[in-house]
């Protein structure tokens, strides 16, 4: 999949341009599915409703898609892949909302979506906070809210971790991010709400109109834009 991993959605023209580039067409011509699942481990039903309806300051579902459907991962095992598989394959973009990343990664596996994702070569995954973090190897203990999470490990679709909402006091300062990165012991990025990370065929590009920091290791690189 093509990935656009954001802290707070499509918050500025640079991130929107990156999304259009990944889609290869205008947003108004693209069919989208939204995943509110992560919200239920943190924000609850009101947050899920705001995400789905676009009634939130974090721009995702309200961007003007050609069509928008809701893909609730907890329902998929009882529906069966023969039913939901065509829904996923017919979408050009999947919008993964925020909440708890360990809960989301659990249900991506349990639903069977994790097995289908490698086949979605032209689909764009747009993550918001936990929707981005779920694709990383680890999120750090401080970001785990779901009580049933065995640890902070997530899906490992990408080889770097993400510290979102950089600059939001008091727990998301750069000093907090640096401490978090030292505990992660792996490639990582701290990004604020005006920053996203685009990943295509393993190539990583930081798209930002704000603040970010790369905690590098030998195998990871990024290009600022």
Image (cartoon, helix red, strand yellow):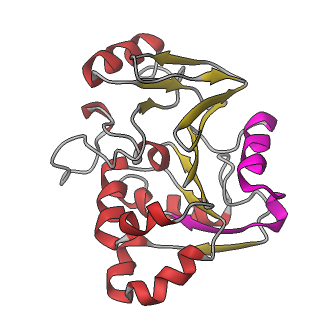
Q: Is residue 117 left or right of residue 18?
A: left
Image location (x, y in percent) of residue 124? 62, 56
Question: Does 39 appear above or below 225?
Answer: below
- For this rendering, which residue is in front, 105 or 42? 105
- Judge whether residue 26 is colored magenta: yes
Q: Is residue 205 left or right of residue 132?
A: right
- Judge whether residue 218 is colored magenta: no
Question: Does 39 appear above or below 217?
Answer: below
User: What residue is shown at x 62% (from left), y 75% (from top)?
Assistant: 69
- For this rendering, which residue is in front, 173 or 45? 173
User: What residue is shown at x 51% (from left), y 73% (from top)?
Assistant: 71
Question: Does 220 appear above or below 96?
Answer: above
Question: Does 198 appear above or below 125?
Answer: above
Give the farthest residue toward the left.
Answer: 150
Split into 4 quadrants, where in the image is the N terminus?
bottom right
Which of the 4 image quarters holds residue 115?
A: bottom left
User: What residue is shown at x 38% (from left), y 52% (from top)?
Assistant: 42
Split into 4 quadrants, where in the image is the C terminus?
top right
Image location (x, y in percent) of residue 188? 42, 25
**Span of residues in magenta:** 13-35
- For this rendering, which residue is in front, 64 or 135? 135
């Amino acid at each position: 999949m093509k990935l656009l991993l954001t802290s707070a959605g499509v918050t500025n023209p640079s991130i929107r341009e990156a999304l259009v580039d990944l889609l290869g067409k205008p947003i108004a011509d693209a069919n989208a599915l939204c995943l509110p699942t992560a919200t239920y481990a943190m924000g609850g039903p009101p947050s899920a409703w705001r995400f789905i309806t676009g009634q939130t300051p974090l721009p995702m579902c309200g961007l003007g898609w050609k069509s928008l459907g809701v893909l609730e991962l907890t329902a998929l095992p009882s529906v069966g892949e023969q039913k939901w598989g065509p829904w996923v394959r017919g979408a050009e973009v999947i919008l993964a909302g925020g909440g708890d990343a360990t809960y989301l990664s659990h249900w991506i596996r349990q639903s069977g979506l994790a097995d289908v994702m490698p086949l979605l070569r032209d689909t764009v995954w747009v993550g918001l906070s936990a929707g981005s973090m779920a694709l990383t190897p680890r999120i750090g203990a401080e970001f785990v809210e779901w009580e049933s999470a065995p640890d902070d490990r997530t899906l490992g679709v990408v080889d770097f971790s993400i510290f979102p909402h950089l600059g939001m006091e008091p727990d998301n300062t750069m000093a907090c991010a640096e401490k978090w990165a030292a505990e992660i012991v792996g490639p990582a990025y701290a990004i604020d709400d005006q920053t996203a990370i685009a990943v295509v065929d393993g190539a990583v590009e930081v798209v930002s109109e704000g603040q970010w920091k790369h905690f590098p290791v030998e195998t990871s690189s990024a290009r600022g834009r």
